[in-house]
Image: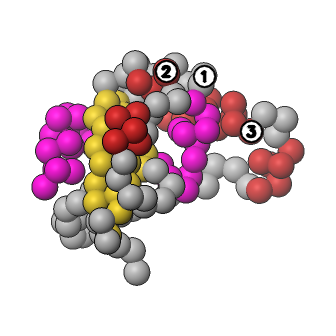
Amino acid sequence: MIDKRFLFNSDIVSPLILRSKVLRSEVEYDQDRNPERTALQVLKRFVQCVDKKIYLVAASQGAELPGKVRTYKGLLWNYEDLKLLEHNLQEVEVRDGRTRLVAVIDLRDFSYSNSENLLLSWTSTFLMISEKTLSDISRLAKK
C-alpha cells in the first residue's frame, strides 16, 4: 500500500491517475553508450510537445530527523542549474518526527544538459503535468 503522504503532507484526492510509458527496453538501455543523455533528449522532446506546465517533483531518498543545516541547504544544494529555475523547497514530516526534503521545480527553462543524477532518478522523482502554477502546487503541498 502506498502512503498518500509520501511527498506532501496532505491527502491526495481520489481518483489519482498514474500513467507510465516504457520508451526503451533493458537491452536498448544496456546497448546505449550514453543512456542518461539519451533519456534527457527524449524528455526534452516530450516537454516540447506538451502544452501544459511540467514540474519535476523530487524528494530526499529517506526520512531523517530534521536538522538546521539539512533544512537550510535544502534538496537542491548540489544542483546549481536546478536552483536557477523557479522552484519551491519544503520539508515535510512523514512519520515519527522524521522529515523528507521536497522540491517542486518548473522545468520550463531547463536546458536538459545537466542534473542527470536528480532529474533521472526514478526512485525519488517524477514529472507532474499540470495547468496549475507553482504557487498553486506549493499551497496544495502545505495543506
Please state which of residues 83 and 106 is positioned toward the viewer in this rendering: 83
**x and y percentages locating residue 20 in the rendered image:** 50, 57
Task: Please tell me in which quadrant of the rendered image residue 17 appears.
Answer: bottom left
Label placed on residue 113: 1
- Residue span colored magenta: 115-143
Q: Which residue matches tag 3?
A: 35
**x and y percentages locating residue 112 in the rendered image:** 55, 25
Please state which of residues 83 and 68 is positioned toward the viewer in this rendering: 68
In the drawing, does residue 78 fall left or right of residue 54? right
**Three-letter residue code for mark 1:** Ser
**Three-letter residue code for mark 3:** Pro
Q: Quadrant of the C terminus?
A: bottom left
**How was this image coloured?**
secondary structure
Q: Is residue 119 magenta?
A: yes
Q: Is residue 20 magenta?
A: no
Q: Which residue matches tag 2?
A: 81
